[in-house]
Image (spheres, grey):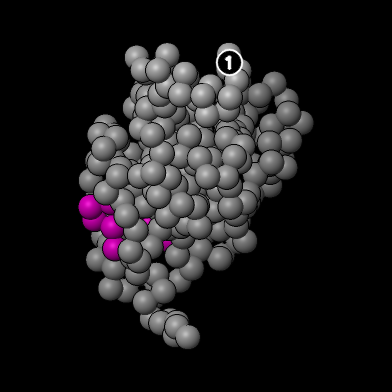
Amino acid sequence: MGELDYDSRHRLKPHDFGILEKFAFTYAPVGFKFFNVEADLDGLGLEPLQSKIAWCQMLLEAQKGRAFYATAENQYCEPGVFLSGMGELSALAAGGRIGPPFDIFPTERANRRVYGHLSLLAEGSTYAVAFAPLNKLTFDPDLLILACDNLDQGERVLRATQWDTGDMILSNMTYVMGCNWMFTYPYVSGNINTVWTGVCYGMKMYKLYPPGLPIVSIPWHHIDRVLRNMNEMPWTLPGHSDRKEEAYQKGFERLGVEGII
């Protein structure tokens, strides 16, 4: 019987990330993790973030090659504090009062409803969040985040998420607080989730990415399965290639029918 090693529980475990190189992502794949207490960071070689930026901006910092951790003092936007469990949800935010003065929502009641959809970690339960590109990853990620720079990449990533299960491809979002849907929602729900660039208010305001691209957040228990699927599945389906007629004829012969699809 195996024996658990408490002291190494946060350290990087073996994952076959090599297949991701085949995608040639413009934006480097990133590992993300929540840490409960400062001591959990010991021995991981992560640098503290020295600036105060929005939570969504931190993802792009890691994609540029930085491996770091951020605490509440580094969070420029309030959602990065209360969603992550680093601090409290203020009455000002929870009451829906922030959106109307900035013409994001017409009334508090519309803005307030958003908070019923969010995944908040318990106040005070998180000391820091960590980001690292895969070539600098020292911790075992809670999420593997893949930002696709075209829909050919996106189709392959999303196909791999359901290749062996037939599960639904999910894209849960609200117009504001896109960080919830990239970080806390997939972590809390366990669901792989896709956020589309150019929609969420903050990410669009900061001009982080070109519009219309999928960012896919994969929780830890799906990571090895999705990577395995990427290795096993056809990179391009025969029906989407110039071999379509040949492939379809083979499929008809296997089924003993003609013209089924």
User: Which quarter of the picture shows residue 76?
Assistant: top left
Q: Which residues are magenta?
A: 128-138
Could you tell me which secondary element the residue under label 1 belongs to? loop
Image coordinates for residue 248, horizontal then vertical, percent: 47, 19
Viewer-closest of 247 and 196:
247
Front position in the image: 116 or 258 = 258
| Foreground of the two, 135 or 230 | 230
For residue 177, above or below residue 1 = above
* Residue 124 falls inside the magenta stretch: no
Relative to the observer, which residue lies in front, 247 or 147? 247
Q: Residue at x 34, y 27 (%)?
A: 149
Residue occupied by mark 1: 258
Q: Please, what is the three-letter code of the amino acid marked with disc 1?
A: Glu
Residue 37, given in percent of the width and then of the height, sits at: 45, 71
Q: Total number of numbered labels? A: 1
Q: Is residue 135 magenta?
A: yes
User: Percent from the top left, x then y, of residue 45?
Assistant: 25, 66
Residue at 65% across / 44% down in the picture?
118
Image quarter of the C terminus: top right
Q: Please determine whether, in this image, residue 119 is positioned above or below residue 174.
A: below
Q: Could one spot residue 8 in this view of the protein?
A: yes
Q: Residue at x 23, y 46 (%)?
A: 65
